[in-house]
Protein backbone atom coordinates (compact mmCIF):
# COMPACT_ATOMS: atom_id res chain seq x y z
CA UNK A 1 0.00 0.00 0.00
CA UNK A 2 2.87 2.35 0.80
CA UNK A 3 4.45 1.73 -2.63
CA UNK A 4 1.19 2.66 -4.34
CA UNK A 5 1.01 5.93 -2.41
CA UNK A 6 4.61 6.79 -3.39
CA UNK A 7 3.92 6.11 -7.07
CA UNK A 8 0.78 8.26 -6.99
CA UNK A 9 2.58 11.13 -5.31
CA UNK A 10 5.43 10.84 -7.79
CA UNK A 11 3.00 10.92 -10.70
CA UNK A 12 1.25 13.93 -9.26
CA UNK A 13 4.52 15.77 -8.85
CA UNK A 14 5.68 14.95 -12.36
CA UNK A 15 2.48 16.36 -13.85
CA UNK A 16 2.69 19.58 -11.87
CA UNK A 17 6.25 20.44 -12.80
CA UNK A 18 7.34 21.40 -16.28
CA UNK A 19 10.86 20.10 -16.70
CA UNK A 20 10.88 20.42 -20.48
CA UNK A 21 10.47 23.75 -22.23
CA UNK A 22 7.08 24.17 -23.85
CA UNK A 23 7.07 23.81 -27.60
CA UNK A 24 5.51 26.61 -29.59
CA UNK A 25 3.51 24.24 -31.75
CA UNK A 26 3.77 21.37 -34.11
CA UNK A 27 5.85 21.58 -37.24
CA UNK A 28 2.71 21.98 -39.32
CA UNK A 29 1.52 24.87 -37.13
CA UNK A 30 4.86 26.64 -37.48
CA UNK A 31 4.85 26.16 -41.26
CA UNK A 32 1.31 27.52 -41.51
CA UNK A 33 2.25 30.53 -39.39
CA UNK A 34 5.24 31.28 -41.64
CA UNK A 35 3.11 30.90 -44.77
CA UNK A 36 0.44 33.16 -43.31
CA UNK A 37 3.09 35.81 -42.49
CA UNK A 38 4.57 35.56 -45.99
CA UNK A 39 1.23 36.01 -47.74
CA UNK A 40 0.35 38.93 -45.47
CA UNK A 41 3.61 40.57 -46.52
CA UNK A 42 2.90 39.96 -50.22
CA UNK A 43 -0.64 41.34 -49.89
CA UNK A 44 0.79 44.46 -48.25
CA UNK A 45 3.27 44.92 -51.12
CA UNK A 46 0.49 44.59 -53.69
CA UNK A 47 -1.69 47.03 -51.77
CA UNK A 48 1.13 49.62 -51.76
CA UNK A 49 1.95 49.16 -55.45
CA UNK A 50 1.57 52.13 -57.76
CA UNK A 51 -1.00 52.11 -60.51
CA UNK A 52 0.83 52.00 -63.83
CA UNK A 53 -0.66 53.61 -66.89
CA UNK A 54 -0.25 52.11 -70.33
CA UNK A 55 2.59 53.61 -72.36
CA UNK A 56 1.59 55.80 -75.28
CA UNK A 57 1.51 54.13 -78.68
CA UNK A 58 4.83 54.25 -80.53
CA UNK A 59 5.44 56.86 -83.19
CA UNK A 60 4.87 55.75 -86.77
CA UNK A 61 8.02 54.42 -88.37
CA UNK A 62 8.94 55.47 -91.89
CA UNK A 63 10.39 52.67 -93.96
CA UNK A 64 11.58 52.44 -97.54
CA UNK A 65 10.89 49.64 -99.95
CA UNK A 66 13.84 48.06 -101.68
CA UNK A 67 12.48 47.24 -105.11
CA UNK A 68 14.34 45.37 -107.77
CA UNK A 69 15.72 47.58 -110.54
CA UNK A 70 13.72 47.52 -113.67
CA UNK A 71 15.69 48.13 -116.95
Image: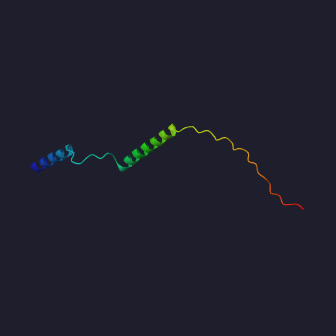
Instruction: Pick whichever, 60 or 11, lies toward us.
Output: 60
Q: Residue at x 17, y 45 (%)?
A: 13
Residue under the image location 12 percent in, 47 percent down: 5
Where in the figure is residue 54, as x and y percent of width and height? 63, 40
Q: How is the image coloured?
A: rainbow
State the image coordinates of residue 60 (x, y, percent, origin top left): 73, 45
Nearest the camera: 67 or 42? 67
Residue in front for this viewpoint, 22 or 39: 39
Query: Furthest-right residue in view?
Result: 71
- In the shown orientation, is residue 44 left or right of residue 63? left
Q: Could you say where residue 44 lies in the image, as x and y percent from the top left?
A: 47, 39
Considering depth in this image, is 25 or 60 the residue closer to the camera?
A: 60
Q: Is residue 14 left or right of residue 65?
A: left
Q: Please name the residue shown 76% across and 51% down the image.
A: 63
Residue extending furthest toward the left: 2
Q: Quadrant of the C terminus?
A: bottom right
Across and down, in percent, residue 27 comes to 36, 50
Residue 15 falls left or right of residue 38 = left
Number of numbered discs visible in the structure rendering? 0
Amino acid sequence: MKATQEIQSQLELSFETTALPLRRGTRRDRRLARARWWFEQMHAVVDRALEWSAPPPPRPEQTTLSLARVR
